[in-house]
Image (tube, rainbow, N blue to C red):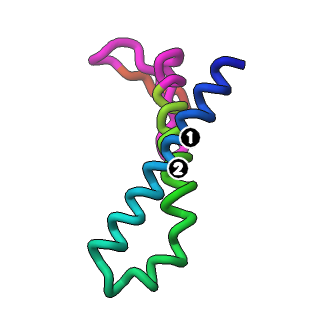
């Protein structure tokens, strides 16, 4: 429950930051501000979601030694040794 509250708090703060960033960009580029308004919700809601997904990936990387890249799975044995699984 605590973890969920932390994640929601981080997401909401990220949404606030996205809104402030959008406002700053529209003030800086006044000529394009009208065009950018259609992307406003993406700036506000998708940016923090991407950050949370990156965080999830980093936390997962702490607990696993197996990665998949372009359909090929690898096991990290040591810092200088990698084995192809399939």
Query: Quick one: SS at disc 2?
Result: helix
The answer to if 51 sits in the magenta stretch is no
Q: Position of residue 11 (x, y in %)?
A: 56, 40
- The residue closer to the viewer here, 55 or 64, is 55
| In front of the other: 11 or 66 | 11
Q: Position of residue 55 (x, y in %)?
A: 49, 32
**Which region is colored magenta?**
59-81
Residue 2 locus on image (x, y percent)? 66, 18
Residue 69 position (above or below residue 57) = below
Q: Horizontally, is 61 left or right of 2 in the view? A: left
Q: Residue at x 32, y 87 (%)?
A: 31
- Residue 72 visible in this rendered orientation of the protein: no
Callout 1: few (<14), some (14-19), or many (20+) C-alpha neighbours within 10 Å?
Answer: many
Residue 14 vs 26, above or below: the answer is: above
The label on residue 11 is: 1
Residue placed furthest toward the right: 1
State yes or no: residue 75 in magenta: yes
Q: Which residue is rendered at x = 47% and y = 17% of the image? A: 62
* Disc 2 crowd, CA 10 A, few/some/many (<14, 14-19, 20+): many
Quadrant of the rendering where the C terminus is positioned: top right
Gap between marks 2 and 1 measured at Cα: 6 Å
In the image: residue 31, left or right of residue 66? left
Check contact, mark 2 vs mark 1: CB within 8 A: yes
- Residue linked to disc 2: 15
Q: State the SS at label 1.
A: helix
Up-down relation of residue 37 to residue 19 (above or below): below
**What label sits on residue 36 in the rendered view?**
none
Q: Residue at x 59, y 26 (%)?
A: 6
């Amino acid at each position: 429950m605590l973890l969920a509250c932390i994640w929601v708090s981080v997401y909401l703060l990220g949404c606030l930051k996205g809104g402030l960033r959008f406002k700053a960009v529209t003030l800086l580029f006044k000529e394009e501000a009208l065009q950018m308004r259609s992307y406003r919700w993406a700036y506000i809601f998708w940016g923090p979601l991407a950050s949370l997904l990156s965080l999830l990936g980093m936390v997962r990387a702490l607990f696993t030694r197996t990665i998949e890249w372009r359909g090929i799975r690898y096991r990290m044995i040591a810092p200088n040794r990698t084995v192809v699984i399939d």
